[in-house]
Image (cartoon, rainbow, N blue to C red):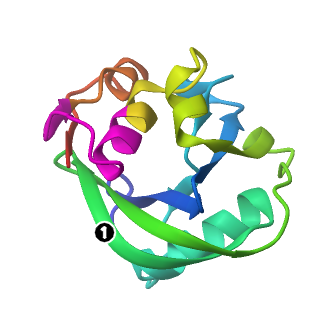
Amino acid sequence: MNDQTCFSVGCIVRRQDQILLVRHTYGGANGKLLIPGGYCQEHELPEEAAVREVLEETGITAQVIRMSGIRCHREHWYLLLEMDYVSGTPASDHCENSEALFLTISEALARKDCTEMTKTVLRKITGQPAAYLYPDMEYCLHKGSDYMLYL
């Protein structure tokens, strides 16, 4: 991996009819609720990164069950992984997020402080109509280039 290449994961953690969200503290999603996630470390598989990132950011133990989508750019790939809750109580890491919580999917979809990408992902995993190609405008505004989310 060179300095400009990165691979990261987005973690869709479900506990029955609830979804795990964090309130981001930086970047284009600063102050907004979104699914937890982060960068893959060198030689780390995406599913290993997902388990680690969820635990580090929220104190929740979860296991990967399937891939749900991918956001692509020439040098940046973001893999969306669905995960089942195993144990733990959500708690902020007081660094990358200021809050970690479970909300029902309908509550998350109704909130104005939830990112559009997160809402698109939630619509897809619940079988609601959603575009399979979604230009991730919030991320484009932050990173300054075109990104496409494939669901």
Question: Which residue is found at the position 74% from the left and 65% from the top?
Answer: 56
Question: In the picture provided, is 147 more to the left or to the right than 114?
Answer: left
Give coordinates of residue 147: x percent, y percent.
22, 35
Residue found 62% across the figure and 25% down from its top: 32
> Badge 1: few (under 14), some or many (20 or more) residues near its Cα, within 10 Å?
some
What span is colored magenta in the figure?
120-134
Q: Nearer the viewer, residue 125 or 94?
A: 125
Label 1 secondary element: strand
Would you place residue 22 above or below residue 81 in this image?
Answer: above
* Image quarter in which the N terminus is found: bottom left
**For residue 116, side relative to residue 99 (left or right):** left
Does residue 105 lie above or below 79 as drawn?
above
* Position of residue 89 in the picture relative to residue 58 (left or right): right
Residue 36 % position (x, y) = 59, 51
Q: Quadrant of residue 111?
A: top right
Q: Residue at x 72, y 31 (%)?
A: 25
Q: Residue at (29%, 60%) from the top-left corner?
A: 68
Residue 46 showing in the rendered view: yes
Percent x, y of residue 97: 75, 41
126 in magenta: yes
Residue 33, percent across and down?
Answer: 62, 32
Q: Which residue is mark 1?
A: 67
41 shown above or below 80: below
93 falls in the magenta region: no
Looking at the rendered structure, the kind of residue marked 1 is Met
